[in-house]
Amino acid sequence: MDKALNHRAIEILHSIVQAYVETGEPVASRFIARRRKDNLSAATIRNIMADLADLGYLDQPHTSAGRVPTAKAFRHYALTAASRTVAGPEADRVREELVQVAAPELLAERATHLLTELTRNVGIVAAIPASAQTLDQIELMRLPDGRVLMVVVTSDGLVRNQVAHLREPVSQDDLISIRNYVNRNFSGWSVTAVREEMDRLLLEERATYDSLLRRLHLLYSQGLLNFGFTPLVYLDGASYLLGLDLHLTKEKMRELFRALEEKQRLIELLDQFLGARTGEVQVQVGLENIHPAMREFSLIGITVDLPGGVETRMAVLGPMRMNYPRVMGAVSQVSRILRSLPQ
């Protein structure tokens, strides 16, 4: 906060931001004067606006035009704007939809859609599995053409699946035996420990002669249990950007969409601005450090734990002239509901 701003200057600054959010047009002093209930003259407001411009809160695109808020103005407004609570019926619907979802990755995906629906902006959620995941169970299913569906469930509820292409036929009975062997011997182990033990077992000479271990080796070499801890990233609502006047060239717009398609870039975005677990909604105005095309964007988000302890960073990405109270209220509401779900 700039200590040079008094109460009246803050009121006028926020009125300008609100007007610009509504219209997208430069705001004139007369427009603000007409909105106020007191008798503050347009000339006085114009002088205050000039001071705000000197302090870096306002720009003047043209000599005769009104003023537009800068990133500094949006940041000031966002940090002092009260979150608008999501309406009762809407909040009940959000809770109802989230309560019905069990798996953490599906819960994260649903939360993404809900953030988009509530804000008409881009919803982003990254579910970050713990590095010490433990194995719950595996399931193996024979598919046509020598393929096998391998499903791995970890104790935090995350489900990973992969299709293996085997060089030799394996019956469903063989797959059931392998599944039972792994689940009986390794359920409750950390995935890392299971992989280490598998490597040790499969190096033993008996693995060459033991039919079950030989087939297990085939599946293991095709990626069974060989998944990393890459966050599951969901994004929804990018189409809303097409209807906004973002002052971007076609090439810059293409760059923006390419950036949003890169999961690693989205993870970096959420890590950089939501890495500190404050338990409160965070606001970042201006994202040019992530990508030049995001210069006039803001990110509003929070970090929560999904059932099973899956750390989850959820956020809404939108233009600077978004409805901050509405978006902050939606992020806060969805995060509260997620935290209230049974672990």
Image: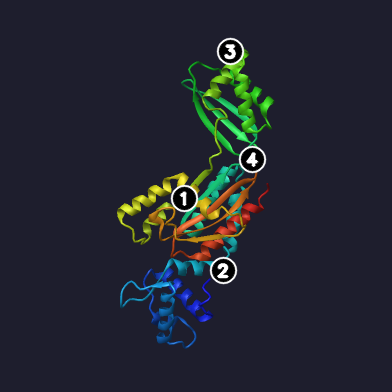
Between 20 and 243, the one lying in front of the other is 20
Q: Earlier in the sequence, mark 4 or mark 1?
A: 4
| SS at mark 4 in the image | loop
Give residue 241's position: percent from left, percent from top.
40, 56
Which label sits in the foreground, 3 or 1?
3
Give residue 342's position: percent from left, percent from top.
68, 48
Going 43% across and 86% down the picture, which residue do you hit?
44
| SS at mark 2 in the image | loop
| SS at mark 3 in the image | helix
Residue position marked by numbered label 3 in the rendering? 208
Going 57% across and 64% down the picture, which residue do you hit?
87
Let me know if residue 172 appears in the view: no
* Count of marks, rendered view: 4
Q: Identity of the amino acid at label 3? A: Thr
Looking at the image, residue 207 sits to the left or right of residue 323; the answer is right
Q: Which mark is residue 260?
A: none
Residue position marked by numbered label 2 in the rendering? 82
38 over 234 or under it: above or below = below
Give residue 176's position: percent from left, percent from top.
61, 22
Residue position marked by numbered label 1 in the rendering? 236
